Amino acid sequence: MQKFYKIVSGLTVPLFIPTYGLMLLLNMNVFSILPYEWKMLAIGGTFFFTILMPALPILWMIRKGNISNVMISKKEERTIPYLFTFVGYAMWTFFLWKIMHFPFFIVAMAISCTISILLVAMINLKWKVSAHMSGMGGLVGSVIGISYVTAMNPVGLICFVLLLSALVALARLELKAHTPLQVFVGFVMSCLLMILPCLFFIN
């Protein structure tokens, strides 16, 4: 089972979550009329800014021995990677806003996602919050928030992301990467941050 939990953790690395989330978003019925090329550009840009931009310097730091492993298990090693991630997410937000012209509530959610990275980095200075669960909380919050704004009720999708979040939480606990409180705080913080723009910036 340990190998299975490692695979789950590997597939749900926080950097992957925005790309997963945008792929889910653009496959919702309300976005079905958008051109295929536009969707691919949006996903490709998200992949570049939220995965490649943060990952390349992190991999370089691993090669130099400044980070012990790709999961960045030690709290003390996380600060600089978080800053790289923050910059990438900030540029991604600008990309969604000025280049792709996404609706403002989605741009606001991207801003919340970027703020979440900054909060995790600040908390990390004193305490090791779960970045994996922060990512999953953001995914769940985005699905709920978009469902609210678009007046949709994708019960199957909501159940799927909740069950996936529970599996990731179990994996992080079984791998002894985090305590239950670290898992809980990471999830709830990002989930609320993603929902709030949909409640206050739209109506």
Image (cartoon, rainbow, N blue to C red):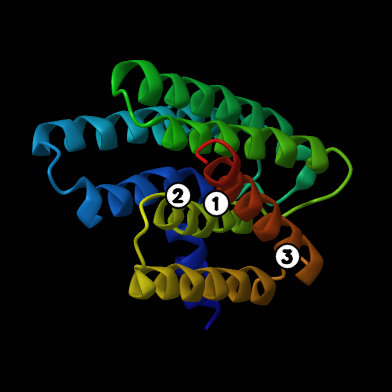
Identity of the amino acid at label 1? Gly
Q: x and y percent of residue 68 in the render?
A: 65, 44
- Residue at the limit of the structure toward the front, as seen here: 203
**Residue topped by disc 2:** 17
Q: Residue at x 19, y 37 (%)?
A: 39
Identity of the amino acid at label 3? Phe
For disc 3, the neighbor class at 10 Å (few under 14, some 14 to 19, many from 20) is some
Q: Nearer the viewer, residue 106 or 55?
A: 106
- Residue at the limit of the structure toward the top, as seen here: 98
Identity of the amino acid at label 2? Ile
Q: Residue at x 65, y 33 (%)?
A: 115
Q: x and y percent of residue 191 in the render?
A: 61, 55
For disc 1, the neighbor class at 10 Å (few under 14, some 14 to 19, many from 20) is many
Q: Nearer the viewer, residue 126 or 112?
A: 112
**Residue topped by disc 3:** 184
Q: CA distance from mark 2 to mark 1?
A: 8 Å
Q: Secondary structure at mark 1?
A: helix
**Residue topped by disc 1:** 138
